[in-house]
Structures are given as structure tokens and as C-alpha cells.
Image (cartoon, rainbow, N blue to C red):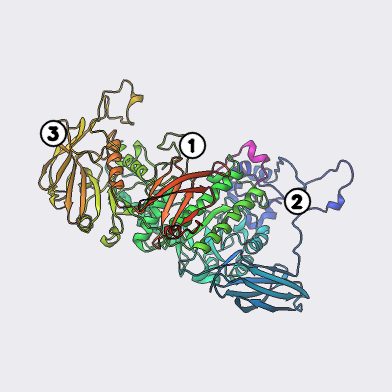
């Protein structure tokens, strides 16, 4: 039962459910008394005793704490039934032609005969036998021959006839395989063999992530020789695995050399790497006297040091719990795969950031769910059917968005997931989070279902037609407040909320979403399809993938970026930016120094002379924006009566939020809107095959009602872009994805209720079609098939 307590803090705040095996035959009719004896002592723990406990509490108090047992309740239940052998396991639900899977025939003795007696639709290679977890296990590599042809294998083991049948075999489209599976945070080491056997037999994904984490389990007690059979079991079956060695106590038994030995067992083909964990905690703002460049460089120096500590020589390195908006810097620092944490941040935002950075770097990306904690497996959340539905949504969305790693941090909890010393009454009595609980079983099944979906469709990365540029030295990390800026000016980061043009339900941090509801939506519908957050460091060829680019928040203009933007527009792109995006300052200031001294005629067709006049009204000269903006828009209608009426928190203002234009000389641009005094506010410059739209505001477009102005302009520009389809979704629930091969997929993002259905209308090429999208079942749509009367997948 009791292994040890790491520290006296956890002794009083972190209780595992104990399992005391006993012979049930000892039970008698009537009342039974069970006595539990705790023999924990300093001597019994030996090297595992944390000496800090004795130093801080004294020897007597330390022993009292170690010897204390508190029981919330006692459950008597049967152990897992013994494995039935002979047995045949490993038959997948689906397969891909030409890609082998492993079958296992388990028998009791070394002399028991095992042989393939018949097969069809496949070729078979015998891989030999090994004694693993109490049985002799014979493995066979089965390679399906042709798509659409069932794959059948008959094996005779110890006189018993065993049959494997895979009826759904799909063609190989040549796409990168998907690594998907649960992670183990809160498990006991005596459950590892059961978990890996279930993982293989039930195909709950193809990748297992082990956390050798002293906060949440006892896996740091396993030596290299104890780890070997677990990893070797996965390697023989060609299953992938990842290892996290983080926050482990000094007496952890697996050394760095042992980590490399375990990684070498699988090699680059099967070992998914070790992660750099929680690096984002070291990212701080520049402060009043610091520069953005210095702050970023300090953070990246910290990140590189964590990379050095975490990397297993000769193997890949990933991230975990590191913010997606900055991940392009991680790739530049030498990271192999960015795996972003979903849950605390807005999930659709993280997908857009990771995909944009990874594609610019030519790398893969993935997602990880935060210990299953924010998805309902924490002490203060119920883990019920709705959270299972959310888990399935997270997996499907990431797969459709292009993630090729979906390896969660948690998911097979067996003890109480009380984390960060959060202890509630619910934590004491809720034992429904065991490995065998229905909700945990259902979540694990979601990994296998997503793997089957990927085998069937094998979508390439989606087509993304819109990009938001993360500017040079923009330290946005996924959440913002008035403290984001050293000037207490929220407009610098509040401009990021303009992502709601493409993701109307985008959420920020852990607070309310922009659509006014205090409840997190987690995912957004996508009225215009997908959007990427693209690093300003991306090369010109990569920027050319997007039909429209927008700069929203901070940017320090450089000669390289200026040149790339000119080339991008000349080639036919549409660019939106505001005056501050043309500044060269590396420090947050209220008075800008503009690129080339303000001589930006080459890109914007204007010369910037400095601060302009006050902006109170915007008057459009054209009706092109009337779908989303009035012809005459008042920005400052009146001073607020109370501070609570301010547009946003501005401690430096005592009256209202003021707006100014820039003092610009128009040299080669068309004025589309002007202020009440006739100063240009919105300008368009046609350059080559494309256009530049400049918002002549001296502030970032997140300031006050400039946000509404910029939102209307952006929506208009987006809707004027060529699009493969138009979506009518009154319920605002359906996200859609376009693929280079002409396929589309629609995903219902409503996980709040079972059987949720959204009725949408898709318009393409002048034809309108009604579609019904069920939650949990992505709808694959191929217009060419529809035109020939075929059904939708």
C-alpha cells in the first residue's frame, strides 16, 4: 500500500488510495474487523527517506507524519481476472494496406506449439517468442495486401484455433503517421504491466507517454532493469512511447544514462522524445526600463538551458506546457516537435499558433491535454460523460488541424489526482477515477477511435488561407491584461482579440470569452475556415501561402520584414496593418520611431511625419464596408460617468479613451475613410497584384472602439477574399477544414450535450446544400462526389 511520502507537505495534503490485498476467504458472515498495520520507518525507507522531512520537523514528528494513515472509506473488490491463455491479441479495428501490424499469441509454456495455419489478404512474418509478464508470447507481423480486401489470419496455439480478422483495410495515401495515445501521471508501478497489455490488446492509441514524476506517482522508484521489460514489451509490438523525467526527487532511480538506454530500445522510429517542460514560467515582461529584445533573449537563454538538460543524446526533443504563440522561437532554438498544452489556454488559439509556426519551420506539431486536469480529471471537476465528449472533440480537432502528435499528459489515473495541494471533500470520496472506471475507459477508447479515423481518411495538413502575423518581439503568450504592457496599456495586447474575426469564440486565459459568456467554449466555429498565427520570421515563400495577412499587436519593423511584405503584396496578397506596426522601437513607448524615418511609400504609399490630430469620428468615402460598419462611426460619444463604464482599464486616464491619427502625407494611396477633420483613417494602396490596407491610427487597433473599427474592416476584407465555400451556421458550432485534395471536413464543436446536431448550409459554386453535422462524428464532404449523386461520409 504505502510506498513513502515525498515531503511533509504532501503528507498532509496529498493522499493516495491504498490497496491492501488480503484473502477474501477470511471474510465471515456478519461484521468483520480489518486491521491495517503501518510499519513505515526511517530504517524501512532507507535511501528513499527524504531527509528534509527530518530536518524541518525533527525525528519524532517526522516519524509521526510518516506513520499516519487516514482512511476516507474502505472498498472491497475483486482483483482483475487472470489472463486467459491461449489468447490472440493485437487485431486492430482498421488497417492500412502495406503497413504491418503485430499479432500476439500467448501460451503458458515454452513447449506449447504456435503456428499460422491459414491466411488471406496479407503476408505474415514470424517475429519469435519471448517470456513476458508471466506468459510465452509469440509475435507475428501482418501486412495487409490491398485496400478494400479483408485481412484474415488463423493461428493454432496450444491446440486452440484463434482467428484474427480486419475487415476494413484502407489505401495508403502517403501521409505522415499519427502518434496518439494516453499518458501516465498518477499510476502505481504495480499497474504498469496491466496498462501496457491493455494498451496493446485494446489499441487505445499507438503511443504511451510515461511521466517519471515524483509529484504524482511512484515511477521514479523504478530502476533501469525494472523499466526494461515494460519498454521492451512496447518495442516488440512496434508501439511508440515518450518519457518525461521532470520534478523527480534526488533519490530517483533512473539516471540520465538509463533514460538513454530506454530511448535506444525504440530508436528514432519508436521513441517520441523527451520534453522541455513549463519553460513559459520564465517569460516575463520587459519592465519599464527593459527592451522586448532583451526580455525575449533572456527567455530563450533559459529555454536553451532547459533543452540541454532534457535532451537525451541522439533523440528528438519536444515541448510540453510551453505557450504556442512563441513556439516559432523554440523551433529556431533547435526544438524538434512543439507539443502544446491544451486546456489552460484556448484550444483553437493554440492550434492556430502551433500550426503556423510548425509549417513555417517545416516541422511537425502536436497537442497534449494538461494531465486531463482541465478536462475534468482534477480534484474540483467531475469526470463524466461530457468530459469524455470533450476529449473526443479535442482529438478530432487536433487531427483535422494537422497535428501529428496527440500524446496526453494524463489519462490513466488510478490514484486520486489531487494536485498542487488541492484537497476537497469530493477528492476524499470520489474513487470513480480508477483505471477501470467507465469514464476513464471511455476516454482511452477515444484515442483508438481517432486513430481509426486517421487511418480511414489520412488527411494532409489543411489549406489555410488567412494568416495573422505575430510581429517581431511580440511576447504575447496566449493571455493578456493591463500588466502585459510596461505602460499599463492594454491596446498592445488587446489587439489579439481581433482573432475573433476568424475564431468568434476564442477565449483568453482562464477568464470570460469575448462573446460575453462566463463559461469557456474551448473551441470556436470557423465561419471562414482556418487561420494561422504566422511568425514574422517566416520567409517570403511561406507568407505567399496565405491570401491575406494581418498585423494586430506589437511589431518592431525590420528591413527584412518590410521587404518580405512588399514582395508578398506584389505577388497578389492582401495585407492589413496599423501605423504602430511600422515602428522600429524595441521598447514599449508612446511616441514611435518609424521605419526609414517614416518614408514607407514603398509599402503603404504614405510618409509618416509624426503624431496627428485627435480622432473622434470615422467617415467612410465608400460603401464597401457597409456590411459590418456604419457609414459614419463615432469613436468617442461621451465621457464615461463612472470608471466602470470605461471601454477598458486605463489607470493613466481620468476621463475618456482618446484616439489620434498619424500625421501622414499621402503619396500613392487611396483614402477610404477619414476623420471628422478630414485626416485619412483607412487607406488602400494597390501594389502589384495585391493591396495594402493601412489603419492610420497612432494606437494599436486594440484600443477602445478602434477594436470595433478594425474588426469591421477585417471582416470585410476576409469576405472579399476568394473562398472555396460559404458557410451558413446559425448555431455557431461548426468548424470546417479544407484539404489540398478537394475534400472538406466539418466538425461540430458542441461537447456540452449528448447527440448534439447542427444544421448548416454550404454554398459552393452557386450551389447550396444542407448538411447535418453530429457532435463526435466529423463530416467528410467531397463536392465532386456530391455532384455525381454520391453520399457524404
Comparing labels 1 and 2, the label whose residue is closer to the camera: 1
Query: On the image, which quarter does residue 365 sit in?
Result: bottom left
Seen as rendered, the residue at the extreme top is 641
Residues at discs 1 and 3 in contact (Cβ within 8 Å):
no
Q: Position of residue 426 (x, y in %)?
A: 64, 38
**688 above or below 289?**
below
In this rendered view, identify the residue nearer to me: 25 or 611: 611
Q: Is residue 781 left or right of residue 481?
A: right
- Give the answer, above or below, for where 115 lies relative to 208: below
* Residue designated by label 2: 20
Question: Can see residue 744?
Answer: yes
Residue 107 x %, y %: 74, 72
On residue 678, the disc is 3
Q: Specify start and end residues of the magenta stretch as a single range.
A: 420-432
Q: Is residue 492 left or right of residue 670?
A: right
Identify the residue at horizontal 73%, vertical 70% (top origin): 135
Amino acid at each position: 500500500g504505502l510506498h513513502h511520502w515525498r515531503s511533509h507537505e504532501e503528507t498532509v495534503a496529498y493522499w493516495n488510495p491504498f490497496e491492501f490485498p488480503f484473502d477474501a476467504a477470511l471474510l465471515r458472515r456478519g461484521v468483520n474487523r480489518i486491521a491495517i498495520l503501518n510499519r513505515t520507518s526511517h530504517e524501512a525507507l532507507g535511501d528513499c527517506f527524504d531527509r528534509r522531512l527530518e530536518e524541518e520537523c525533527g525525528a519524532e514528528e517526522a516519524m509521526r507524519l510518516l506513520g499516519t494513515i487516514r482512511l476516507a472509506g474502505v472498498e472491497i473488490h475483486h482483483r482483475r481476472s487472470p489472463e486467459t491463455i491461449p489468447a490472440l491479441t493485437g487485431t486492430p479495428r482498421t488497417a492500412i494496406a502495406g503497413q504491418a501490424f503485430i499479432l500476439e499469441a500467448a501460451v503458458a509454456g515454452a513447449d506449447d506449439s504456435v503456428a499460422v495455419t491459414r491466411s488471406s489478404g496479407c503476408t505474415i512474418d514470424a517475429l519469435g517468442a519471448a517470456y513476458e509478464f508471466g506468459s510465452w508470447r509469440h509475435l507475428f507481423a501482418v501486412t495487409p495486401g490491398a485496400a478494400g480486401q479483408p485481412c484474415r489470419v488463423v493461428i493454432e496455439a496450444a491446440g486452440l484455433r484463434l482467428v484474427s480478422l480486419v475487415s476494413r483495410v484502407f489505401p495508403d495515401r502517403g501521409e505522415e503517421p499519427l502518434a496518439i495515445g494516453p499518458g501516465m501521471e498518477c499510476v502505481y508501478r504495480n499497474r504498469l504491466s496491466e496498462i501496457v497489455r491493455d494498451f496493446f490488446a485494446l489499441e487505445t492509441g499507438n503511443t504511451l507517454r510515461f511521466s517519471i514524476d515524483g509529484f504524482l506517482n511512484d515511477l521514479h522508484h523504478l530502476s533501469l532493469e525494472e523499466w526494461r521489460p515494460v519498454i521492451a514489451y512496447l518495442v516488440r509490438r512496434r508501439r511508440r512511447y515518450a518519457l518525461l523525467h521532470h520534478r523527480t526527487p534526488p533519490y530517483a532511480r533512473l539516471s540520465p544514462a538509463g533514460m538513454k538506454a530506454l530511448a535506444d530500445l525504440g530508436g528514432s522510429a519508436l521513441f517520441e522524445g523527451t520534453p522541455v517542460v513549463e519553460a513559459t514560467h520564465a517569460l516575463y515582461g520587459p519592465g519599464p526600463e527593459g527592451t522586448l529584445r532583451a526580455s525575449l533573449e533572456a527567455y530563450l537563454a533559459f529555454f536553451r538551458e532547459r533543452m540541454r538538460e532534457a535532451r537525451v543524446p541522439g533523440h528528438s526533443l519536444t515541448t510540453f506546457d510551453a505557450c504556442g504563440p512563441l513556439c516559432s522561437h523554440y523551433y529556431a532554438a533547435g526544438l524538434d516537435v512543439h507539443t502544446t498544452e491544451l486546456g489552460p489556454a484556448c484550444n483553437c488559439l493554440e492550434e492556430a499558433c502551433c500550426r503556423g509556426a510548425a509549417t513555417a519551420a517545416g516541422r511537425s506539431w502536436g497537442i497534449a491535454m494538461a494531465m486531463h486536469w482541465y478536462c475534468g480529471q482534477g480534484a474540483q471537476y467531475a469526470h463524466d460523460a461530457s468530459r469524455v465528449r470533450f476529449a473526443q472533440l479535442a482529438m478530432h480537432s487536433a487531427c483535422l488541424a494537422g497535428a501529428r502528435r496527440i500524446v496526453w499528459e494524463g489519462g490513466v489515473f488510478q490514484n486520486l489526482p489531487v494536485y498542487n495541494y488541492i484537497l476537497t471533500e469530493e477528492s476524499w470520496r470520489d474513487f470513480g477515477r480508477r483505471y477501470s472506471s467507465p469514464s476513464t475507459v471511455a476516454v482511452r477508447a477515444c484515442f483508438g477511435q481517432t486513430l481509426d479515423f486517421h487511418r480511414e481518411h489520412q488527411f494532409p495538413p489543411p489549406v489555410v488561407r488567412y494568416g495573422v502575423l505575430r510581429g517581431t518581439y511580440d511576447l504575447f503568450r496566449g493571455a493578456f491584461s493591463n500588466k502585459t504592457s510596461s505602460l499599463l496599456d492594454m491596446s498592445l495586447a488587446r489587439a489579439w482579440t481581433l482573432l475573433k474575426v476568424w475564431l468568434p469564440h476564442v477565449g483568453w486565459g482562464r477568464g470570460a470569452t469575448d462573446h460575453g459568456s462566463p463559461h469557456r467554449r474551448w473551441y470556436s466555429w470557423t465561419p471562414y475556415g482556418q487561420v494561422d498565427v504566422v511568425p514574422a520570421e517566416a520567409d517570403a515563400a511561406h507568407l505567399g501561402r496565405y491570401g491575406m495577412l494581418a498585423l494586430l499587436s506589437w511589431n518592431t519593423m525590420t528591413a527584412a520584414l518590410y521587404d518580405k511584405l512588399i514582395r508578398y503584396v506584389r505577388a497578389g496578397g492582401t495585407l492589413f496593418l496599423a501605423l504602430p506596426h511600422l515602428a522600429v522601437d524595441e521598447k514599449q513607448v508612446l511616441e514611435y520611431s518609424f521605419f526609414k524615418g517614416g518614408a514607407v511609400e514603398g509599402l503603404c504609399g504614405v510618409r509618416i511625419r509624426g503624431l496627428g490630430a485627435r480622432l473622434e469620428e470615422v467617415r467612410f468615402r465608400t460603401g464597401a464596408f457597409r456590411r459590418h460598419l456604419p457609414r459614419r462611426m463615432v469613436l468617442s460619444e461621451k465621457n464615461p460617468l463612472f470608471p466602470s463604464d470605461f471601454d477598458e482599464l486605463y489607470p493613466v486616464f481620468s476621463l475618456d479613451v482618446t484616439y489620434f491619427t498619424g500625421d501622414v502625407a499621402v503619396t500613392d494611396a487611396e483614402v477610404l475613410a477619414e476623420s471628422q477633420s478630414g485626416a485619412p483613417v483607412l487607406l488602400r494602396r494597390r501594389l502589384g497584384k495585391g493591396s495594402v490596407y493601412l489603419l492610420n491610427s497612432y494606437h494599436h487597433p486594440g484600443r477602445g472602439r478602434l477594436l470595433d473599427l478594425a474588426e469591421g474592416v477585417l471582416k470585410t476584407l476576409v469576405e472579399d477574399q476568394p473562398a472555396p465555400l460559404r458557410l451558413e451556421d446559425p448555431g455557431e458550432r461548426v468548424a470546417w477544414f479544407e484539404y489540398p485534395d478537394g475534400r472538406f471536413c466539418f466538425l461540430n464543436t458542441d461537447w456540452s450535450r449528448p447527440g448534439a446536431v447542427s444544421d448548416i448550409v454550404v454554398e459552393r459554386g452557386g450551389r447550396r446544400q444542407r448538411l447535418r453535422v453530429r457532435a463526435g462524428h466529423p463530416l467528410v464532404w467531397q463536392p465532386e462526389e456530391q455532384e455525381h449523386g454520391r453520399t457524404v461520409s
